[in-house]
Amino acid sequence: MIDLVIDQRRRDLGGGFEVGRVLPFAKRRMVGPFIFFDHMGPIDLAPGLDRSLDVRPHPHIGLSTVSYLFSGQIMHRDSLGYEQEVRPYEVNWMTAGSGITHSERFEHARQHGDHLHGIQAWVALPDGLEETAPSFSHHAGSDLPQWEEAGVTGHLIAGSAYGLTAGASTFSPLFYAHLELAPGSTAEIPDGHSERALYIAKGTVEVDGRRYEAGKMLVFGAGISRVTASTQATVMVLGGEPLGERFIYWNFVSSSKDRLAQAASDWKAGRMKLPDADDQEFIPLPDTPAPPAAPAWS
């Protein structure tokens, strides 16, 4: 059965660039270790777009960010010295751990124009590894196993599913995959994990006898094992094992409210290193109080 249907909430991040926020949700903060899920675009970006649309340097702790695109290009720069563009069907996997800063710039779009469409997810780190050393990796080709069968094309982004294992190093049991479904085709939804969900990025699908349209995340209970495409559809399937309670403040994730407050203090005081290749500006700490007074996404 389907336990919950979550509708994306559209948010303008500035300059007309909208995202559909799915996780966290008031009635469902996480699915397995997945604690944040944003649907970026789709949006056409014109050549010469204003730099205010870029995501300036900002900090993270206690999580891994997973950037995956259906179309478009984004340039990543971080405080470890990595500078790596992410392109369609590739993955930038950045583990913040004890602390990292990075920027995301639309440089290709600024020069040539672009059609941007993708997903950014955050995966919380498990107990004992929240303060792991920060790291960055880029994955393409064989690191993201692909398969085709009976009208379904799959791309495994992370973890293990469908008898395959992706290249990114993960810190807890999970799976994350992108499926393209031809009309009338049916795909299996991986089992073996306590929590699972499906997000419809494009098209219409049928699950357990009911139809669902793009922009919805279906959180599964026991028994659900397949999805059928009513139209050409793009879906993301994800899940894993729960980690226990996690708190979010701005771009920080932790099991400790005090740790969130410390991270906020460090950023405000300039104690977190900016990317060497992008250190001339940054996003200030929000005006909302830091936890423990307000341990929630601002």
Image (tube, rainbow, N blue to C red):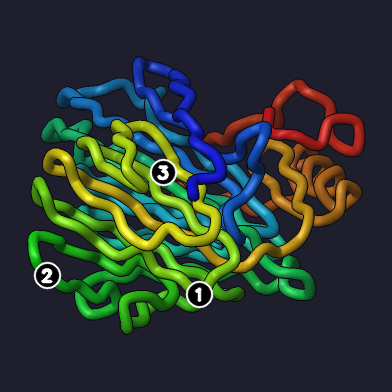
Residue 204 in percent (x, y) is at 23, 36
Q: If you read the primary sequence from the N terminus, does the residue marked by circle 1 or circle 3 appear first? A: 3
Eye-nearest disc, 1 or 3: 1
Q: If you read the primary sequence from the N terminus, does the residue marked by circle 3 or circle 2 appear first? A: 3
- The numbered dot on residue 192 is 1
Quick check: marks 3 and 2 in contact, CB under 8 Å?
no
Residue 209 in percent (x, y) is at 32, 43
Q: Amino acid at mark 2?
A: Glu
**Between residues 74 and 165, which one lies in front from this camera angle?**
165
Q: Could you give the CA–CA distance between mark 3 and mark 2, rounded to whole angstroms?
A: 32 Å
Q: Amino acid at mark 1?
A: Gly
Identify the residue under disc 3.
104
Query: Residue at the location (49% across, 44% down)?
Result: 37
- Secondary structure under badge 1? loop
- Secondary structure under badge 3? strand
- Tell me the crowding category of disc 3: few under 14, some 14 to 19, or many 20 or more residues within 10 angstroms, Cα based: many
Residue 189 in which image quadrant: bottom left
Identify the residue under disc 2.
148
Q: If you read the primary sequence from the N terminus, does the residue marked by circle 1 or circle 2 appear first? A: 2
Q: Could you give the CA–CA distance between mark 1 and mark 3, rounded to whole angstroms?
A: 35 Å
Quick check: marks 1 and 3 in contact, CB under 8 Å?
no
Q: Could you give the CA–CA distance between mark 1 and mark 2, rounded to whole angstroms?
A: 22 Å
Residue 124 in which image quadrant: bottom right
Query: Residue at the location (45% across, 35% down)?
Result: 55
Q: Amino acid at mark 3?
A: Glu
Q: Quadrant of the C terminus?
A: top right
Query: Residue at the location (55% across, 66% down)?
Result: 240
